[in-house]
Image (cartoon, rainbow, N blue to C red):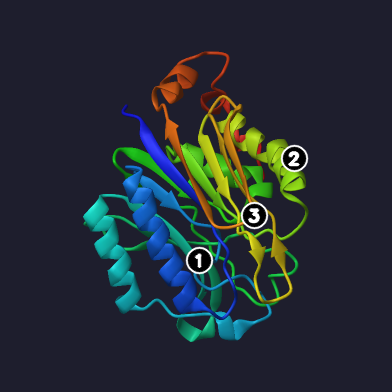
Amino acid sequence: MQNIRVTLVIQNCPVNRFAHNFAQTVKQVSAAALQNCDFVVFPEMNLTGYAPANLSNAVALDSVWINKLNRLAQKHNIAILTGLVEKAAAGKIYATHLVIRPDQPVARYRKIHLSPFEAPYFSCGDDADVFKFKGVYFGIQLCYDAHFPELSTAMALKRADIIFFPHASPRGTPGEKSASWKRHLTARAFDNAVFVAAVNQVGENNAGLDFPGISMMIGPDGFLAGENIAYENKIKTHVLDMSLLEHIRTHKMRYFLPNRRGNLIDE
């Protein structure tokens, strides 16, 4: 399998400034394209900012700005993964991440596990879908989702090669966030033999929250493959050697998923 280039975008995402955030997103997509990336991945809710109690911050999916992102994906032959607070039908509000690829309908992942701070305001998603681009199968989880190992396993069983973890996590310093991610995200990668990529917002968001800027790439062997600490908007492109997946998955003592006894897990 060919190498895949993934650009992780640490982005400042002020609340109630959709036009500003969208313009920054377009700018960063173009910058990532200059690095010949295949995927450009933004933090959770990068378009709207993160303020769960501020329901006026939610936006409906609009063909005008979505079409602009579609044209960018088509122009650069890349997949764009970008997030927002989605105002859906019947007044439901979701934490949503969009998947925008050339010549394919816009897909989305709606956050399945809501934190105690989010549950009073958002609805839960129900679909742990896996998507495909350039021969790579990938899943998306949002922030709090990362703490539920069975969700990563469900995606791995659907053939995910990469799981992306966009975050809007305001707690701690970049060093503390790094230590936290290394505790649990390395396990998600190692147990399921998948690449794991995580990226957070950065800086103050005009709603009383301050985010530690960090992104991280972890290999399917569970080892750290790259990390980026930032105090402003910043991108980092990682080159993934996809042959490492085959190396791990053909090793009898390093690929655990085929020997999983799923019947022991209560529904």
Q: Quadrant of the N terminus?
A: top left
Residue denoted by label 1: 96
Per the image, label 3 sits on a secondary structure element best described as loop
For disc 2, the neighbor class at 10 Å (few under 14, some 14 to 19, many from 20) is few
Q: Which residue is at 58% across, 60% downward?
A: 112
For disc 1, the neighbor class at 10 Å (few under 14, some 14 to 19, many from 20) is many
Residue denoted by label 3: 231
Q: Amino acid at mark 2?
A: Ala
**Mark 2 or mark 3: which is in front?**
3
Q: Which mark is residue 83?
A: none
Q: Position of residue 174 (x, y in %)?
A: 71, 48
Residue denoted by label 2: 179
**Mark 1 or mark 3: which is in front?**
3
Q: Is residue 37 left or right of residue 19?
A: left
Q: Which residue is at 28% across, 64% downward?
A: 70
**Residue 229 appears in the picture as rendered:** yes
